[in-house]
Each structure stands twice: as structure tokens, then as C-alpha cells.
Amino acid sequence: MEQRNLTMLTDLYELTMMQGYFCSGNQQRVIFDVFYRTNPSRSAYGIMAGLEQLISYIKELSFSKDDIAYLRSTGIFMEEFLKFLADFHFTGDIYAIPEGSVIFPREPLIKVVAPIMEAQLIETAMLNIINHQSLIATKASRVVYAAKGDGIMEFGLRRAQGPDAGTYGARAAVIGGCIGTSNVLAGQLFDVPVKGTHAHSWIMSFPDEYTAFSTYAKLYPSACILLVDTYDTLKSGVPNAIRVFQEMKDAGIPLHNYGIRLDSGDLSYLSKQARKMLDAAGFTDAVISASSDLDEYLIDSLKTQGAAITSWGVGTNLITCRDNPSFGGVYKLAAVEENGRFVPKIKLSENSEKITNPGNKKIYRVYEKESGKIKADLIALEEETLSEDCDLLLFDPIETWKKTRMKPGSYILRLMLQPVFLQGKCVYTSPSVMEIRDYCQQELNTLWEESRRLINPQEVHVDLTTKLYELKKELLDTMK
């Protein structure tokens, strides 16, 4: 892993389209929206993540001499176009929902307003960055929710699809609520807590289990979590751990952040038996942590069974989001500037969910004032201004007979898209990862519990204003 310019991290057709626009003299400004259609992992929401890396990408957007030489070697690009690329930089505007925010399908997570060549080029890298981190942050939030207040540590680096996925996935996992990561590089880059114990190989490298435990305890007396399942968890591992803890206590060594880790077997049964043994020996505050191919469903099941586990290490299923390995974000043209005004564009499809929302848009988040919970998200045209002093009509844009009218004083509005770049200059300062994590927890608390449950959660509605709905209907009628 090293800092590198990602300008060439793009699909070839972005560059061939750019050359086509260049040759045709097309310099018009356009609006593209980034959005996704379906929540991942059977969730009712997503978590926005990756904006800081997107900002770095846009800031560094430029073609080096080596880049130009490579593009020339393909035989695809004209010299005039390559000369244009040599001086290329981003001059447009970008608006985005802040990292850590709760997000929903079909609403613009990012809005790009830029000359068409600039807007076209950034599509691939933007989707790559936002799709990956939003996916992992969403998965992490579900795992954390299942743990019901217990700490979740991310430690999937060895199973991630490469160094980038492991490192930026760790960042996203912390945003989603993990208390730390085993990934030391992620800790260094993003200033997040790094945590870990030892492997079975540590135990096996010593003459016996007790000696391995004792040696580890002497090295790390204030972080002594012992892996007890190398040989026999209840007959050997836990008794030897208790022996070491007692020796530490007798020697006057403070017992802080100490306990055992289970990595195999029936975690519910073993943890309950281990808890009894630890308590009987007087170590009632000893931590019992667990790993072993955990995900939100297994953690929820173990909690339901009364497992005596209070700390969880989640690896493969989190860092790869095994049950839903793609976030599915897309990048679609929404408007084209003609004679100084943006003309809305719409993409048609036989699948209704793939029909886009046209025009220059913004998002209002509607909160129920009494509870502070999200009532709905409302997509409006940029020219519209909504007021909390007026009646607010919410209706399903597909099943339009489903309507709710909210009275003045009963709701709060919040604009979600924030300026990130204006005229090519960054106007946004990214918070630290731990600050984003805290904000994300606040955001998750605005969801109703019915929308957070792991199985069959209640959908959060994303509606259109009447004006946007009528515009969309008009374009559909015209196109058909």
C-alpha cells in the first residue's frame, strides 16, 4: 500500500467517450447522480462512507507524462486529445451526503455538476470508492447492532480481497461502529484503535499451554486475553488461564483488560461453562471474547441463547460482506445544460426501479419532531424550498394512493447534500474516522427499531415532491 494517483483508475470507455466529446466540441455542463437501488444484506438502510478518499482522488486528478505515454501506446487516442489531457484538472462542483450518514435507495448520495468530460472521467473511481466503503460500513453497523452494546473488533485483513480492501474496509468498519481493527496499517493511516491477542501458533510453539499463557501475561499484563481452545477448552485452556490470572493477582499485578478468547466449538455452551469457572475462581470481570466465522445472524443467535460473550472479533464475513459482496451504486445522467439552464434527462427501463429521477435535485430528510426519528426522505428539485411552517405531503411515487400529510410543527427538515467541491476547489473538511463513527451512531439512532431489525426490517420511504413527480411523469409520457 502506498499513496498513489488514481487518475488512471478508470474504465476505458470513460476515456473513449471523453475523446468523443472532445472531438465533437461538447463542453456543456451536466449533472450526474450517484445512487443505489437496493439496500445490502437485507437491511433497510445503508451507511455513506468513502468521501475522504473521494476527495483525495479529485484533488490529485491529473495525467502524468507516463500516463499520457501509456495512452498513446494503445493507438486509440489522438494527439490533440492527449495534449488536452496533459493539462486536465477538475473544475466542477460536487455535493455529497456526509460520511457516516444513514442513506436509502434511489436518492442522490453524490451530485456532480461539471463539464461533461470531467464528469464522465470520475465515474469509475468514484463508484469504486463509495461502493466498497459504504458496503462494509453498512455490514459493520448490522454486526454492531446484533451485539447489543458489546464491542466488535474488525480483524478480517487476511481474508480481504487485497491490501486496499483490507485497509479501507477496516476504516469503513470502524465508521460502522467497530471499536477497533487488527489492521496496523489502518490504525496508522486513520488513527483508529488497533487490537489483537495471539494465535494458536503461539501456544503450540511452547512446551505446554501454561508456559505459553504465563509468558504472554508477563509481556502484556494490561492486555492479557488468552486463546484457550488450542487443545481442550474446558479441561486445559480455561484452567490454565485461571492459573495465570491467579498468579498475576498474587503478584500484585492489576488485572485490567484480561480474559479469554474462544475461536472454535459450541460458543454458547463453552462460554457459559467458562463463565462459571472464571466466576468460581473470583475473576468475575474477566472478558470472554469470541471469534470463528461470526456475522450478525450468528451473534444474534448466540445472544438469544444466553452466551456469556461480551466481546466479538468478526473477520471474513464482515470485511468481504460475504452475503452481499456488492453495494450496487450507479452513476446516471440527470440533466444537461442548454442555454444557461439545466434540462432534465431521464433513463427509461422495462424495470420500474431502473427508471431514474430527472433534473437538478436535493434531498430533505424529514424527522418526526416528537420522536426525532426519520419519517421519510424527500427528493426535491433544486429550485424548490420547503418550509416547516407549511403542511407537508408525503406520498409513494409508485403507489401514489399511499399518502401522509404532516402538519406544521410536527416535523423537522434537514438538507442532506453538502457542498464538497465548488469550481474545482475543495470546500469541505473531513472529520476524523472516530468522529465519523460517533456521528454514525447518532444517525443510526434516528432510525426506528423496526427499520434496524435484522430480519424483514421496515422500509424507510424515499418520496418525491409533487413538482418532481409531475416532471418525471411528464418526461415518461413524452418519451413513450
Image (cartoon, grey):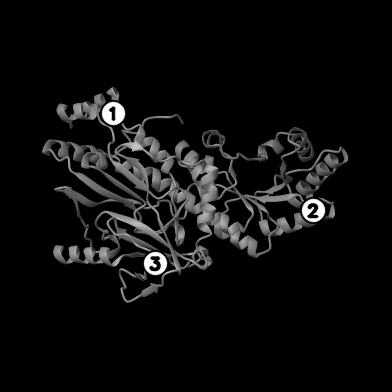
Q: Which residue is mark 2?
A: 284
- Residue 416 x, y percent position in the rendering: 40, 54
Q: From where the camera sits, is residue 317 visible?
A: no
Callout 3 amino acid = Asp
The amino acid marked with disc number 1 is Phe
| Labelled pair 1, 2 in contact (Cβ < 8 Å) | no
User: Mark 1 or mark 2, which has the lower sequence index?
Assistant: 1
**Alpha carbon distance from label 3 to label 2:** 56 Å
Of the numbered discs in the image, which one, if any, rests on residue 63?
1
For this rendering, which residue is in front, 466 or 12?
Answer: 466
Q: Is residue 368 left or right of residue 74?
A: right
Instruction: Find residue 117 and report its image quarter.
Output: top left
**Secondary structure at numbered mark 1:** loop
Decide: few, some or many residues near mark 2? Use Cα within 10 Å; few <14, some 14-19, many ≥20.
Answer: few
| Mark 1: few/some/many CA within 10 Å (<14, 14-19, 20+) | many
User: Secondary structure under badge 3?
Assistant: loop
Q: What amino acid type should be assigned to the residue bearing mark 2?
A: Thr
Q: Where 381 falls versus 76 (above or below)? A: below
| Residue at the spot 74% in from the left edge and 49% down from the top edge | 232
Q: Image check: 149 left or right of 212?
A: left
Q: Nearer the viewer, residue 244 or 411?
A: 411
Q: Which of the 4 image quarters holds residue 102?
A: bottom left
Question: CA separation, marks 3 and 1?
Answer: 50 Å
Q: Is residue 2 visible?
A: yes
Q: Which residue is mark 3?
A: 389
